[in-house]
Amino acid sequence: MTQDKEAALKVLFKALRGASIHPARVSLVWRLEEGLFLYARGEGEVQTLTEIELYEKEALLMDLFFMRPDISVLIRSRPPHVEALASVRNLRSLGPSLDDAAQVIGSRIVISPEDKTKRIRRALRKHQACVVRAGSDSYALALGRTLDQALAATLILDKSALAYVEGCLLGGAKPLNPLMAKLYRMAYLSYYQKQDQALLSQTAEDIP
């Protein structure tokens, strides 16, 4: 692992800690060149794996990379509010109630049982994150073309889960109008995502 990637992972885990997501509850896969993948479980275990090795270790994650050749990073985490959202019975999906969720994640946030892999793949075909219900170990899956995008999707998904759970206590969360949610997403994909790419050429001192 290069020093740049090692430093980037340290920044990511620091950001997750700041959102009360302990690194021990995080798995990350980062697509490298020549069919290799960087696989990290928390901060302690970091490996470079081939496609076959990753498939043997994490079949679902490898399937998602095959399905989405445009992504480079996939984060699986267990944020506290996502786990609370997954515990809501009979909830299969929800419309985003936050405009940044509509932009970064998409027009629907899907909650799928872990054994419904086709539903998980379908949810992530056009969206950047979903919730996977796995009993007491429910988790979030977030994708991105860069480490920053996958991190943003993770944090925004947790914030959306918090908005839904707290909204229920106050009479119900109000999702965005579906048309507006789609427009937010289209605007993000056509403009803001290009700005994300521009950030890659800046130094850490340039980005607040």
Image: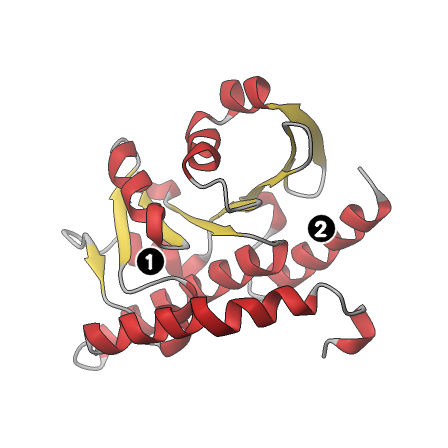
Q: Which mark is residue 9?
A: 2
Question: Considering depth in this image, is 199 or 204 the residue closer to the camera?
Answer: 199
Q: From the image, which quarter does the C terminus lie in? A: bottom right
Three-letter code, disc 2: Leu
Q: x, y (%) of residue 154?
A: 48, 58
Quarter of the image where one finds residue 40: top right
Question: Considering depth in this image, is 161 or 193 the residue closer to the camera?
Answer: 193
Count of marks placed on residues? 2
Query: What residue is pinned by disc 1?
Result: 84
Report crowding for label 2: few under 14, some 14 to 19, many 20 or more residues within 10 A (C-alpha): some
- In the picture, measured across the screen, residue 175 lies left or right of residue 69, that is left
Residue 133 seen in render? yes
Helix, strand or loop at label 1? It is: helix
Three-letter code, disc 1: Ala
Q: x, y (%) of residue 75?
A: 53, 47
Q: CA distance from mark 2 to mark 1?
A: 27 Å
- In the picture, measured across the screen, residue 144 lies left or right of residue 175, that is right
Q: x, y (%) of residue 171?
A: 16, 80
